[in-house]
């Protein structure tokens, strides 16, 4: 018979009666920059990581990002179950490959792609990869056009507003394309159609228009931009394609702005990118790019690889990645349908308009966008106050909210604004709580005189 204090059983008893935090692993320094000599129990390793991650912000209160932070339990279970499926292994995972094709076709039809033109597309890591692919397609199609006798061989250029996401500048730098940036002006933060023609020439590989800018959430006047390009193309005998960066608005406009002409209904629109992990309502990272027809995507960009048992046509920049986000996108399509997406976006829009009205009621802010296009609120301080939007952003962070303050693009860079992105999982009650904290923060800031210096103006990337 053994007692509680028998040396023979001491180690086993210690393991049983002491909780994880009493173990030696939790009082020793945690390796930071090199592999530890020995491992540790799984629950201890997991707890150490969870403890460190607690110091981060709450994703649900992160109103800076467009990226989805809430999904249904069934979707999360599907993601966990399919993380081990390599999307590129289409011969081993033919059903996952088939689901990707279905999603591409659904999105092409959503964007009014015509069946007889045989739209093409692919999933990507996000809109950044999708934009690189669309840009490359425009450049290669331009190269083919320039091979004709008498055409110029000068540096190709891409026309876009200074309000584009920074990835477009990356594309131009990485692939040696001249960026021709149309400046926005204070009070108007989207591309002016009247200025587009003066930036075009025979070396223009395409024009980029934005359906939902990252700076303010507004739709650019795409139909008017299209008409300017069409007139230039007819006059100069050169067809210049229009690409739509619909990263933020591509999954919103078809459902709550169905009358808006922005997609393949416009004949010069050759390609569209959209982020499934934004208003496609999927966790990061999943994006999509769709071309109007087979001829829109140059054959030179499609590689046919004999890989793991079958011939694989591929035209993505990335190779191996899990199929889980594609599965999650298909889950949303089946689960929600047109009716579900419409109801969700109408609810987001209603919350956004309600919160914008509350912010406007304070009388000190100019609301630039209220969430009518996509559920995004952007506002600046219009009255003389003893604080800046940067001060207000810091104060709200102390209360748990992550709401960015930043400068508008070049030529409007003296305008500092705040932006609130309404996403699935943000309720009317949360909006009222946020407004209460905005109001109390304004009162607190008015009672002091110290200002936080604004951060250096950077291209906004969320």
Image (tube, helix red, strand yellow):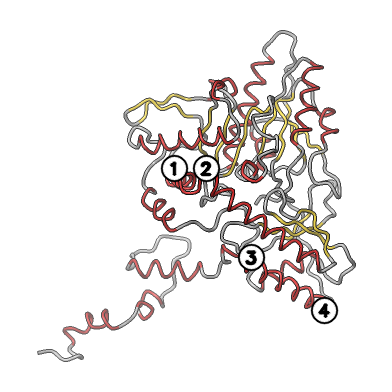
Q: In this view of the protein, which residue sits in the foreground, 102 or 380?
A: 102
| Residue 406: percent from left, percent from top | 75, 57
- Give the mark nearest the N terminus, 4 or 2: 2
- Give the mark nearest the N terminus, 1 or 4: 1
- Residue at x 62% of width, y 41% of height: 254
**Label 3 to label 2: alpha-carbon separation:** 32 Å
Location of residue 213 with respect to 139 vertically, above or below: below
- Give the mark nearest the N terminus, 3 or 4: 3
| Residue 84: percent from left, percent from top | 36, 47
Q: Cβ–Cβ below 8 Å for labels 2 and 1?
A: yes
Alpha-carbon neighbours of circle 3 within 10 Å: few (<14), some, or many (≥20)? Answer: some
- Give the mark nearest the N terminus, 2 or 1: 2
Label 1 element class: loop
| Residue 350: percent from left, percent from top | 67, 57
Label 4 element class: loop
Label 3 element class: helix
- Give the mark nearest the N terminus, 3 or 1: 1
Q: Which residue is mark 1?
A: 321
Q: Which residue is mark 3?
A: 428
**Label 3 to label 4: alpha-carbon separation:** 31 Å
Q: Which residue is mark 4?
A: 448
Q: Cβ–Cβ below 8 Å for labels 3 and 2?
A: no
Alpha-carbon neighbours of circle 2 within 10 Å: few (<14), some, or many (≥20)? Answer: many
Q: Which residue is mark 2?
A: 125
Q: Seen from this angle, which residue lies furthest left?
A: 1
């Amino acid at each position: 018979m053994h007692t509680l204090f028998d040396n023979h059983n001491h180690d086993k008893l210690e393991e049983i009666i002491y909780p994880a935090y009493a173990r030696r692993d939790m009082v020793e320094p945690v390796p930071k920059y090199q592999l530890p000599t020995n491992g540790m129990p799984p629950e201890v390793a997991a707890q150490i990581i969870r403890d460190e991650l607690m110091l981060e912000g709450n994703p649900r209160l992160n109103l800076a990002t467009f990226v989805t932070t809430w999904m249904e339990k069934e979707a999360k279970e599907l993601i966990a179950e399919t993380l081990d499926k390599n999307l590129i292994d289409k011969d081993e995972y033919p059903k996952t490959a088939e689901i990707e094709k279905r999603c591409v076709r659904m999105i092409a039809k959503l964007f009014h792609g015509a069946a007889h033109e045989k739209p093409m597309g692919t999933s990507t890591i996000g809109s950044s990869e999708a934009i690189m692919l669309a840009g490359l397609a425009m450049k290669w199609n331009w190269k083919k056009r320039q091979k004709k006798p008498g055409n110029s061989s000068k540096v190709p250029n891409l026309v876009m507003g200074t309000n584009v996401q920074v990835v477009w500048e990356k594309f131009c730098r990485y692939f040696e394309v001249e960026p021709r940036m149309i400046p926005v002006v204070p009070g108007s933060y989207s591309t002016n159609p009247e200025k587009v023609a003066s930036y075009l020439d025979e070396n223009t590989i395409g024009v980029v228009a934005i359906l939902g800018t990252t700076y303010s959430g507004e739709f650019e006047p795409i139909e008017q931009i299209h008409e300017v390009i069409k007139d230039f193309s007819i006059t100069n005998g050169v067809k210049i394609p229009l690409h739509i960066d619909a990263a933020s608005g591509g999954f919103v406009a078809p459902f709550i702005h169905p009358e808006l002409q922005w997609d393949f209904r416009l004949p010069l629109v050759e390609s569209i990118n959209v982020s499934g992990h934004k208003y496609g309502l999927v966790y990061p990272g999943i994006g999509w790019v769709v071309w109007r027809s087979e001829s829109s995507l140059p054959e030179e960009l499609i590689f046919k690889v004999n890989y793991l048992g079958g011939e694989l046509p591929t035209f993505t920049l990335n190779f191996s990645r899990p199929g889980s986000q594609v599965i999650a996108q298909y889950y949303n399509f089946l689960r929600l349908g047109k009716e579900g997406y419409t109801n969700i976006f109408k609810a987001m829009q209603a919350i956004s308009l309600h919160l914008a009205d509350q912010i406007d009621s304070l009388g000190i802010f100019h609301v630039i966008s209220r969430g009518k296009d996509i559920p995004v609120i952007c506002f600046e301080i219009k009255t003389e106050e003893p604080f800046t939007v940067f001060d207000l952003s810091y104060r709200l962070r102390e209360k748990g909210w992550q709401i960015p303050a930043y400068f508008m693009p070049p030529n409007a860079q003296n305008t500092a604004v705040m932006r609130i992105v309404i996403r699935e999982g943000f309720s009317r009650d949360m909006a009222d709580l946020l407004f209460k904290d905005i109001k109390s923060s304004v009162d607190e800031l008015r009672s002091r005189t110290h200002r936080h210096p604004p951060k250096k103006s950077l291209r906004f990337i969320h």
